[in-house]
Image (spheres, coloured by chain):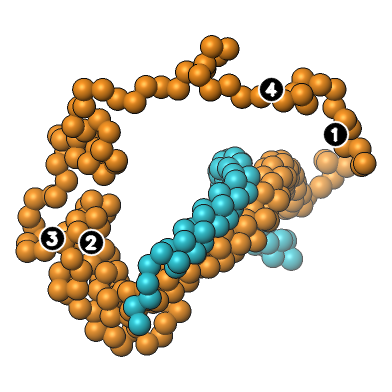
Chain colours: A cyan, B orange
Amino acid sequence: MTTLWWIADIVLLVAVIPVVLYLLHGVLSAAKSIVPSVERIASAAAAGSKDLDATALLLTTQDQVAKTVAGVAEYGGSLDVIIDDAS
Amino acid sequence: MLVASIEPVGAVALVAALLIVLALVFYLVSTILQLRKITAGLDTVIGSVSEIVQKSAPVADVVNSINGQLDAGVDLLEGLLVQKAGMQDALGLVEGLYAGSAAAGFRSFPESGTTTAPRIGEVYTKGTLTLARLGREAPIAMANPAGPVLRNVEGGSLAARSLYPEVRQTRPDALPRSPVIGTDAPVQYEQRDDIGAPRRRLPGKRA
C-alpha cells in the first residue's frame, strides 16, 4: 500500500505539476500578448476618430456641389437658348 | 506533533498539493491583472469607436446627396451635348477629350454604347479643336497628337488680349476719359431724400 502512495507522489511531482504549470503559463502568456494588441487598437481607433474630424467639411462640399450644379444648370439653360439643336 | 506523525509519503503528497495551489494562485492573479489591463484598453477602444460611428453617421447621406447632384449635373450636360451636337458628334468630342470614354457611352443614352464615335478631327473645325485643346491641353491635335501645344506659353497673356474688345491692344493715342464725379461734375444726379433719413419701419416688424 505504501508503494502505491509513493508511485502516486512521483506521478504528482513528475507529471501533474509540470502539466499544471505549463497550462497556467500558457494562459498567462496569452493574456499578456493581448494587452499590446489592445493598446495598438486603441491608438488606431483614436487616430481614426481624429481623421474623421474633417467629415464636417462634407456639408460645405455638399453645399458647394449644389451651387456648382445649379450654376452649370443655368449655363446649360443659356447654352440651350444660344446654340441650335443638332437636328 | 501532527507533522511528526505524518508519514514521509503523506508529506510529499502534501508538499505537492501545496506547490500546485501556490502555482494556481500566482498564475491566476497574474492573469487577472492582465485581463484588467485588457478591459481598460477595450474601454478606450469603445470610446474611440463610438466617436467614429458618431462622426461617420451622416457621411453616407451627404455623399449620396453629393452623388445625386453630380449625377443630375452629368445627365444635364450629357443631354445638352447630345441635343446640340448629336449623338455621334457628342461621342466624338467626349472621346477626343477623354480617350476611351466613348466605349462606355453616356449613362442616360443606352444607344450611345453601340454608336461608333467619329474621329474628332473630321467633325469639328479648327477653332473648336483649339478651344478644346486650350482648355484641356488634351492630345487632340488635328494632324499629330504628339505635336506641340497650340497655346503660346510665353505670349499667352498677349494672345488672350485679342479675345476682348479692341481698346488697348493697338495702343491708341487717346482713350475715353474716365467719368467726372463730384459737385462740379458735368452730369449731376438728384439726391435721394430717403438716404440718411430714419427708417420708415424697423427690420423684423411686419407692416
Q: From the viewer's side, name the closer residue of A79 and A37.
A: A79
Q: Quadrant of the N terminus of chain B?
A: top right
What residue did someone put label 4 on? B191
**Nearer the N terminus, badge 3 or badge 2?**
2
- Residue A4: x and y in percent read 69, 65
> Vertical placement of B172 versus B31: above or below?
above
What residue did someone put label 3 on? B141
Please, what is the three-letter code of the amino acid marked with disc 1? Pro
> Vertical placement of B91 versus B130: above or below?
below
From the viewer's perspective, is the residue at label 3 or at label 4 nearer? 4
Report, in whole angstroms, how far the alpha carbon at label 3 lies from the one at label 2.
11 Å
Q: Quadrant of residue B90?
A: bottom left
From the viewer's perspective, is the residue at label 2 or at label 4 nearer? 4
- Residue A83: x and y in percent read 38, 67
Q: Residues within 10 Å of mark 3 (few under 14, many from 20)?
A: many
Q: From the viewer's side, name the closer residue of A71 and A81.
A: A81
Label 2: state its secondary structure.
helix
